[in-house]
Structures are given as C-alpha cells and as structure tokens.
Image: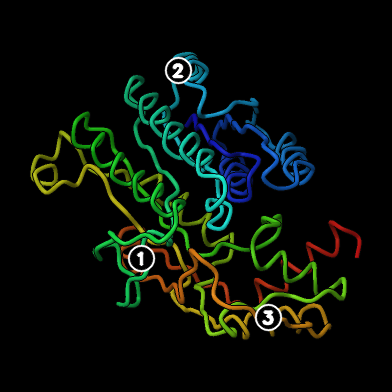
Amino acid sequence: MKFLVTGAAGFIGFHTAMRLCRLGHEVLGIDNLNDYYSVDLKLARLARLQDAPGFSFRKLDIADRDAMRALFDEQRFERVIHLAAQAGVRYSLDNPHVYADSNLSGFVNVLEGCRQTNVGHLAYASSSSVYGTNAKVPFAVEDAVDNPISLYAATKRANELMAHTYAHLYRLPTTGLRFFTVYGPWGRPDMAPFKFTKAILEGQPIDIYNGGEMSRDFTYIDDVVEGIVRIQDCPPPYANEPEELRRGATDRLFNIGLGSPVRLLDFVACIESATGVEAIKQMKPMQPGDVLQTWADVGALASRTGFRPATPLHEGVARFVDWYRTFYGV
C-alpha cells in the first residue's frame, strides 16, 4: 500500500518507515528537520532510509496548511502513520507555542488531509503522559485521562479527542497509540537512555530525580514498530458495521509498552552493566511535569493484534549501547 509517515527523520518514524519498506510498501516520509535535537542524527537516519526500496522523502512542516493540503491532494495515500510532533515534557514548560503549532494545528492538517482524500486508516502517536497522575496501575485505555500535568501531555490528549471527533463526524477510521518510554538504536538524545549512556561513557555525572524513586515502562523500539505495523491491518470498523458505530468504535486507542515498569536506579544499573562503567550519580528533586511511574496494560493490543511487547530490558539496553558506541566511535 501507499503510506505517508510523518516525522520520518525522527526515532520512531525512521524505524517505522524502514520496516514498511522492507515489507514491500511504498512510503513517503515527511519531516521539518527542526533543531530540537541534533539535525545531524536526523540526517543520518534519512541517509539510511534513502537506500530503502520504495522510500521517498520531502522536507515539510505539518503546520504548513497549504503544503499539507497539496501533499494529500497529489499523493492520495491509502494509509497514514502520524508520528511527527514536538516532543518532550520539560521543553514544553518554556516553549508552549511550538507545541500548539505542531501538535495541535499540525494534527488538524493531518486529519483534514485524511478526511478530504478518504484515507483508509490513520494511526497516530499519543503518549503514556496522558495518564498524568493516575494512581491506578497498570494504566489501561479505559481509564480516565483528564489530569495531564504538562502541556505536552495535554496536546496528546487533545489529539485523541480531535481524532475521535473526526471519526464520529466523518467516519474516518483512526487509531491512537500511547507509547511508553521508547528506547533503542537511533534513539533521541533528549531521553534518559541516551543522556545516561553518553554521560556514563564520558565520565560525567547523571541526574537522578526524586532520589531514583521513579519507574518507567521502558519499551524497545522493535516492539513499538511491530505494534504499529500490526495495527495497520486492524482499522476500526465504520459505516458498514452499524453496531460498532453506535458504540463509538470508529476510533480506537491502544497502549504500546512492555508492561513491566523498572525503577530508575535499576535502569541505570543496566546501562552500567552494558558499558562496564559505574555511573556518577547526582540526586535531584522531582521535576515539574514528571510523573512517578508509568505502567502499560497491553491487554487490548494483545487481544486485537495477537502481539505483546517482550524484549527484556537488559537485551534492549545492550543493543542500544552497542549502537551508540558504533555510531559515535566510543
């Protein structure tokens, strides 16, 4: 099929586009190549993608309404995987307008493009951050998500509501994917796995927030991509299935996480084991916008697709460290 992958130079977008090409699909990737983190890393990902059969790329900002409309009119995609967004919880504290432009206006442009050209299925990135300070664990897609504690989280929840509205009004099949702390080769430099590995190998201290009494459901990139790809074959039912339609089933949400939270200090220990270097730890207080834990209930994903993420943390961290050493020559 013919796919649009937004954010194709990003971490998850790169891996997703590569996997789709290997499966024989035609993939057009777009990305604005902003400098939120290293543009050189994004260009290196794209260089790998350019060799993938069936892949093409355009530099394009999803917030550019006219350019997005022209793209959809010209290409007539069968499927859209929307992974472009302004990421980062802490960055949103000081740069709110960037999130409004990309995560809100940009998402409307994607929705409109899909609606106007009758795209068969829109899958889009949400985030575990929508669960906010929910006390019930593990987090399930049926749980209330009305207490986000960062602007980033609020924009991701807004995306889910916007997609639901388009599904209801226009019968656009949409699937939101709540990702849980994705890590692995080619990962983002602003995330803990990358930052910790870099600092540990350079003999620099790492910041441990809340005394290390935090836990995250770290999810290996291959498991995330497998979930994304399997979801493509499971579009929500729409007008031809009236019973599902009455129950609001024109859109769906799934968690994609390992389902096994890890304490921050235990995660650091995995990196220490993989690098052979002991970390220099600096204890810091809890940061605004952070949550104490994330933990995915992936029962809905397993039930719908037959897939459940399973890469053990120590294996995933070892693969990431191997990639980091090779890519940066350390």
Identify which amino acid the numbered label 3 is placed on. Val
Where on the picture, by quarter, is residue 192? bottom right
Q: Does 178 sit left or right of 34 as displayed? A: left
Q: Secondary structure at mark 2?
A: helix
Q: Which of the pair 161/284 is nearer the observer?
A: 284
Estimate how packed mark 3 is, as few (under 14), some (14 to 19) or many (20 or more) residues with alpha carbons within 10 Å: many
Q: Nearer the viewer, mark 2 or mark 1?
A: 2
Kindly identify which numbered label has been placed on residue 69. 2
Q: Secondary structure at mark 1?
A: helix
Kindly identify which numbered label has been placed on residue 274. none
Residue 103 is situated, as x and y percent measured from the top left of the image, at 46, 40
Identify which amino acid the numbered label 1 is placed on. Ala
Q: Earlier in the sequence, mark 3 or mark 2?
A: 2
Q: Earlier in the sequence, mark 3 or mark 1?
A: 3
Q: Does 85 sit left or right of 57 as displayed? A: left
Q: Secondary structure at mark 3?
A: helix
Which image quadrant: the C terminus?
bottom right
Q: Which residue is mark 3?
A: 268
Residue 25 is situated, as x and y percent measured from the top left of the image, at 54, 35
Figure check: 37 above or below 97 = below
Please name the residue shown 63% across and 80% down the image: 267
Q: How many marks?
A: 3
| Outermost residue toward the right in this view | 329
Kindly identify which numbered label has been placed on residue 302. 1
